[in-house]
Amino acid sequence: MSTSRRRDKAQADIGFEHLMSAAVAEFEADSRLACRAMRVKMAIGMFGVGSVLPNDLPLKLPTESLHESLVSHTLQ
């Protein structure tokens, strides 16, 4: 009777390890997908480009505003 319990325990351990390895693999796949989504979101936020259409590009700043600094605005 004790040998059947040991066999059942061994089979349960194998099943548990298989379950855990499958869970870890799924977690790793989800993590990679989330990381990729975060990189894409950050790139779109950084460059402001959602597609290659010209109307999605940010507007060009006037050249005169480039010479002014933040300090010059606070001193006025």
Image (spheres, rainbow, N blue to C red):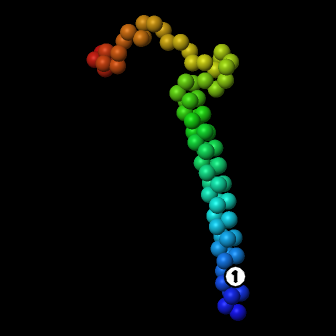
Q: Quadrant of the C terminus?
A: top left
Residue located farthest toward the top when viewing the structure as drawn: 64
Q: Residue at point 64% right, 61% down?
A: 21
For this view, does 44 lie left or right of residue 70? right
21 above or below 73?
below
Tell me residue 23's x, y (percent): 65, 60
Q: Residue at point 56% right, 30% down?
A: 43
Tell me residue 33's x, y (percent): 63, 44
5 above or below 29?
below
Tell me residue 27's x, y (percent): 62, 54
- Residue annotated with mark 1: 7
Q: Nearer the viewer, residue 33 or 46?
A: 33
Image quadrant assignment for residue 54:
top right
Tell me residue 18's x, y (percent): 68, 65
Where disc 1 sits, the SS reads helix
- The kind of residue on which mark 1 rests is Arg
Q: Nearer the viewer, residue 7 or 27?
A: 7
